[in-house]
Structures are given as structure tokens and as C-alpha cells.
Image: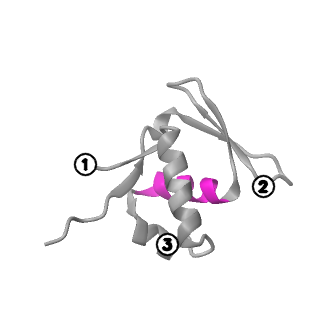
Amino acid sequence: MPPRPPRWHVADPSALLFQHWPGEDEHVVFNLRSGDLHLLNPAATAVLGRLAEAPASVDDLRASLNQIDASALDAVLESLDGLGLIGPLP
């Protein structure tokens, strides 16, 4: 049997504070644990928001966030993982 693709989750949802200003596309996320502040574009915000609801595989994310194309979704996941905001479930 081939290995299952990873399911992604928000690394520490209780440590994230979100801010959005009306009329702006981006969101600001502050990580209470690291002290880092991140400016997220709409695609990254959508992915992080979806993963805050429940862990999901790439296929689940593609199905629920169909406005984001596959290559952009892969780039967003890589970026959010690199920032320490999300990670694969073991």
C-alpha cells in the first residue's frame, strides 16, 4: 500500500491572533509563542482558516478551497509550514 499523503494542521491555534481591516485583502497573524507577526495574502488566510477548523489533506483542501489552484496551494502550504504556523500530522 502506498504511503498516505500528510494531513496538515495548525501547529498551535491557541497561540495565533488574527486581525483584518475592512477593505483590505490581507490578514495579519501574530504568533504569541514566537512573537512573530505575519502578513498573509487571501490564499494563505483561507488555508490557515480551513486548517484551524480541522486537520486536512491536500485533497481535502483542494476540494474545500477550489478557488486556489493546485500549484498555489502547494506554495501556500510550504510557506505556512516554513513559518511554523502549520505542520503535517504524524
In three-dimensional space, the C-alpha distance between marks 2 and 1, rounded to whole angstroms, equals: 33 Å
Q: Is residue 69 above or below residue 11?
A: below
Residue, x 52% and y 24% (percent of image)?
Answer: 34
Q: Which amino acid does label 1 sit on?
A: Pro
Q: Where is residue 59 in the image (x, y as percent from the top left)?
A: 41, 72
Q: Which of the numbered marks, if any, corresponds to residue 90?
A: 1
Give residue 54's quadrant in the image: bottom left
Please report contact status of discs 3 and 2: CB closer than 8 Å, yes or no.
no
Q: Which amino acid does label 3 sit on?
A: Arg
In three-dimensional space, the C-alpha distance between marks 3 and 2, rounded to whole angstroms, equals: 21 Å
Residue, x 60% and y 59% (percent of image)?
Answer: 46
Tell me the residue that label 3 is attached to.
62
Residue, x 42% and y 70% (percent of image)?
Answer: 60
Secondary structure of the residue carrying numbered label 1:
loop
Q: Which of 80 and 25 is in front in this view?
A: 80
Give residue 37's quadrant in the image: top right
In reply to whether residue 5 is colored magenta, the answer given is no
Q: Where is residue 8 in the image (x, y as percent from the top left)?
A: 39, 54
Q: Which of the numbered marks, if any, corresponds to residue 70?
A: none
Q: Look at the image and give the residue range highlighted in magenta.
A: 43-54
Tell me the residue that label 2 is attached to.
25
Q: Where is residue 53 in the image (x, y as percent from the top left)?
A: 47, 56
